[in-house]
């Protein structure tokens, strides 16, 4: 008995969005019994988990077509092509094209060895392999930003819209530009069309996502900023109740976006910052565009405009050359800026990046520092959640009667509610890093 294509997604919100695009393309192409892995290259651990999942999928589904794509596959396609479990490797730009999925797909011979099929039109083969077909372009040559309309995001209460892809910056630790290419933006009219379509489909919250969304618009006619784009889209979709943003660069928040933070109630009071470190020397060695004081000033300005705003942050622990004093500056900024939603990563060497050639911090020290940062984040989260007890909040309902407030605080509901609905609740208590809410 055949089944719809299965998507296994690793990594960022942008990958979540793109998996839904691929799901639709693969289903329309009749790719039954296919398992598509959308990989991440941010850390070695993310790549290890992907390889482990691919091997497990083959053991459990000996006749399935296994297709691997995403950033890790784009950067090192041959590593996946050499895996006997894999039938096909697809690059990050080609994965979003419907024509790629309409190709004759490799099938598995007896014994598990796939048959080669021709590359996509316009695609460049990354080299033949004994095991898999490889369809991968030079990502740096890609100029267009795919703007793909999806009807919704399976299993999610909110929808994601890709407004930007790629990155023009070259942080010394980051391999992602080599998986995503240079920065490319989706035109405002196309974003507005997608927003209206998703709102008509019943979505009450939309997340604008990308690799480096504060660089939005630099490649478009007139060079509209991110804030200008959001303001125009909200004007064209007045019925949209809630908007969130993916990770922001602290020093690239434009004046239109600052005005929206101050005045637009539909922009949720929850910003996630691409912080990475709180020590100036480490930030310089990372080749970041901000310093410690910039982050403090950004958080302070946002709170002047909106006193209840809450912040998340991406932080790397144990970056090369990081001393205990340098790490302490990062640890302190969590409390100084009152950061709440921490995404903490022990530094992971990425071959080909400048940071991989710097003097490395021992792995056990990286992990210990990451644990201390996570503990600080748990303390911050507990303090944040307690502020909501005995307050009324509006939540968007997710799966299993869990919801999220305007500030992204998780709430366990006292009764059933329709996923995707906006409901008012009274917060009655806090338990197990979650709020308890009574539906009103």
Image (cartoon, rainbow, N blue to C red):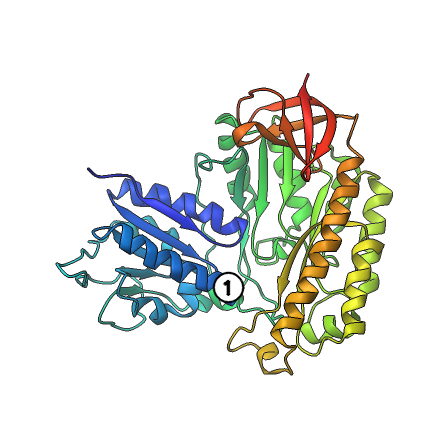
| Residue toward you, 232 or 45 | 45
x and y, in percent, of residue 274 in the image: 68, 58
Q: Residue 92, can we see it? A: no
| Residue toward you, 251 or 70 | 70
Please indicate whether residue 19 sits to the left or right of residue 165 in the image: left
Q: Residue 372, can we see it? A: yes
x and y, in percent, of residue 197 in the image: 49, 31
Image point 60% across, 32% down: which residue? 236
Image quarter hosting the C terminus: top right
Q: In this view, does 44 lie above or below 267?
A: below
Please indicate whether residue 164 sits to the left or right of residue 130 in the image: right
The crowding category of the residue bearing disc 1, from other C-alpha atoms within 10 Å (few below 14, some 14 to 19, many at least 20), is: few
Residue found at the very far left of the displayed protein: 110
Which residue lies under the disc numbered 1?
45
Total numbered labels placed on residues in the image: 1
The image quadrant of residue 354 is: bottom right
The image quadrant of residue 79 is: bottom left
Image point 49% across, 64% down: which residue? 41
Q: Is residue 31 above or below residue 371?
A: above
| Residue toward you, 249 or 229 | 249
x and y, in percent, of residue 286 in the image: 67, 72
Image quarter hosting the N terminus: top left
SS class, disc 1: helix
x and y, in percent, of residue 151 in the image: 43, 34
Q: In this view, does 273 lie above or below 113?
A: above
Image point 63% across, 57% down: which residue? 215
Please indicate whether residue 59 sits to the left or right of residue 93 in the image: left
């Amino acid at each position: 008995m055949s089944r719809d294509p299965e998507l296994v997604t690793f990594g960022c919100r942008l990958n979540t969005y793109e998996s839904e695009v691929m799901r639709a393309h693969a289903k329309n192409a009749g790719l039954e019994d296919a398992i598509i892995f959308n990989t991440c290259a941010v850390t070695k651990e993310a790549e290890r988990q992907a390889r482990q999942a691919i091997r497990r999928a083959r053991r459990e589904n000996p006749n399935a077509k296994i297709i691997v794509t995403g950033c890790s596959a784009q950067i090192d396609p041959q590593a996946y092509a050499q895996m006997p479990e894999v039938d096909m490797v697809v690059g990050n730009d080609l994965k979003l094209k419907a024509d790629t999925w309409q190709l004759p797909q490799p099938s598995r011979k007896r014994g598990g060895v796939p048959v080669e099929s021709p590359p996509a039109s316009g695609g460049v083969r990354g080299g033949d392999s004994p095991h898999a077909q490889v369809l991968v372009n030079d990502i740096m040559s890609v100029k267009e930003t795919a703007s793909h309309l999806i009807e919704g995001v399976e299993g999610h209460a909110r929808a994601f819209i890709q407004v930007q892809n790629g990155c023009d910056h070259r942080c010394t630790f980051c391999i992602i530009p080599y998986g995503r290419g240079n920065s490319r933006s989706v035109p405002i009219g196309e974003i507005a069309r997608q927003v209206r379509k998703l709102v008509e489909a019943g979505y009450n919250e939309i997340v604008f996502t990308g690799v480096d969304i504060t660089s939005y618009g630099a490649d478009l006619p007139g060079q509209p900023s991110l804030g200008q784009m959001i303001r125009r889209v909200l004007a064209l979709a007045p019925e949209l109740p809630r908007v969130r943003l993916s990770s922001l660069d602290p020093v690239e928040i434009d004046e239109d976006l600052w005005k929206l933070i101050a005045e637009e109630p539909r922009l949720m009071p929850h910003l996630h910052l691409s912080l990475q470190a709180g020590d100036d020397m480490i930030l310089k060695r990372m080749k970041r565009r901000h310093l410690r004081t910039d982050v403090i000033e950004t958080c302070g300005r946002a709170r002047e405009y909106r006193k209840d705003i809450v912040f998340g942050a991406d932080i790397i622990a144990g970056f090369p050359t990081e001393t205990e004093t340098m790490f302490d500056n990062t640890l302190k900024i969590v409390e100084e800026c009152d950061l709440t939603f921490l995404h903490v990563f022990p530094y992971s060497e990425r071959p080909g990046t400048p940071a991989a050639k710097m003097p490395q911090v021992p792995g056990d020290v990286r992990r210990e520092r990451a644990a201390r940062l996570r503990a600080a984040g748990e303390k911050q989260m507990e303090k944040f959640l307690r502020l909501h007890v005995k307050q009324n909040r509006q939540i968007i309902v997710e799966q299993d009667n869990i919801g999220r407030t305007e500030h992204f605080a998780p709430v366990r509901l006292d009764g059933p509610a329709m996923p995707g609905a906006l409901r008012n609740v009274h917060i009655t208590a806090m338990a197990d890093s979650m709020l308890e809410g009574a539906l009103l």
